[in-house]
Image: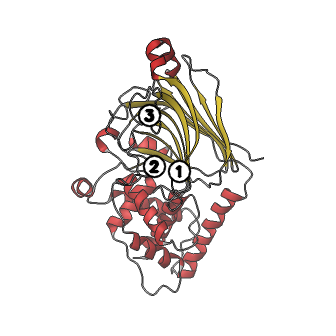
Amino acid sequence: MDELDLLAFAALFAEAYQKCFALAFVRPVTETEAKIFCNKILDQTGLSVGWKSVKNYSIFLLDGTASRQENPSVATLDTLARYVLGAPYTTEIQRKNDESHYPYWFMYREKFAANRKNGKTKPTVLSRSLLLMVLAVIATVIIYSLFFSNKPAADFTDDFHHLDENTMAANGWYVKSKDPAYWSRRGDAAGRLTLFTLRGDTWPNPSAKPGIKNLLLRDITGDCFTAEVHLDDFVPAQEWQQAGILILEDTVFTGKSIRLSLAYNDNFGGSKMPNEIYVQVITSLGNGFGKPEELAHRTLFHLDSLRNNTELMKNLLNSALRIEKHGSRFRFLYSGGAGENGAFREIASQEFDIKPKYIGIFAIKGFTNSETVPVRFKLFKLTADKCN
């Protein structure tokens, strides 16, 4: 690699790492981090990068005594650039057929060169120590902005009126475990994001790995926030159909997580009770800590009540779920009604030790064969709160 390519690669790798982990790239990545990094790139771009290569790149870029120089392929550079720039989802075959000239890497490189030209005088010789100094300056700025600035992160609201891939990526969204057939139907209802209750769950299952298809995620940078999602006329009516908000420490479901959902239940552990629509809060300590804990279970309606009084169905026309986090204290709230201005009611309040990096919205039906139904999301809001 020439000097410009190496500097552009260093900046690209640091930017991709920052996007993935919401942390500055200041140390070589571990094996686990490299695998998480590669999984997120695959989920967003449809293209793969080897985790061992990612680990070696990080050592090469930060360790001036690295025994060998790394020369990532142009395809790998293009994949990293697609991830950073929020390029549309593709596959290796599609890229080979339509974009074999690797436009995103050269787009990133050209932009980097232009910014560099407009900045300080271009150095004549590149040294590893200079590269380390550049990365150190970048890391210092990022760390200061994340941890020492009193200004909270910018608030974000999405009313889902613009669902093209580029706009969603520019708004900070990315999709994990994309199901192309159903993801292509996300705009089925005008002015709504439509997800579907596909087979999947974060609850452990001896015959299936944890996973949620078309899980829509974004990064969290603050320790105190309020997250809110509004649903349009969602009535779960079969086994484990549900939708809601998910908070995660990682995107491979090995760390701690919290799930707040509007759901259907017909399983009462052998007890005979009427089927119900309810709000549920589940917390998980991650791999190696046994089963998750059902923190809250608030019945909204029994199905026989809805059949006997159809007017009650109007209370599900406008459902909303909210999570408030202040340090380790969480509040979980629900609102429902025929109008959009229904008051939130607290479902539970609990201390939970988690340092979430991601928040997502989802629709699932567990590992069951119940019907796949649409769930229309009309609003997502994430507000950065000041910590007391």
Q: How far from the left and from the top, in percent, is residue 316?
A: 50, 22
Q: How far from the left and from the top, in percent, is residue 115?
A: 52, 61
Q: How far from the left and from the top, in percent, is residue 236?
A: 43, 29
Name the residue located 60 percent from the left edge and 35 percent from the top edge. 322
Q: Name which of mark 2 and mark 1 comes first in the sequence.
A: 2
Q: Amino acid at mark 2?
A: Thr
Circle 1 sits on which residue? Answer: 292
Up the image or down, 78 lies above or below 164; here it is below
Secondary structure under tag 1 reads loop
Q: How far from the left and from the top, in percent, is residue 336?
A: 56, 23
Up the image or down, 187 lies above or below 219; here it is above
Secondary structure under tag 3 reads loop
Circle 2 sits on which residue? Answer: 202
Q: Is residue 158 visible?
A: no
Circle 3 sits on which residue? Answer: 162
Name the residue located 34 percent from the left edge and 57 percent from the top edge. 103
In this figure, what is the number of numbered marks? Answer: 3
Q: Nearer the viewer, residue 309 or 28?
A: 309
Q: Name which of mark 1 and mark 3 comes first in the sequence.
A: 3
Q: Name which of mark 2 and mark 3 comes first in the sequence.
A: 3
Secondary structure under tag 2 reads loop
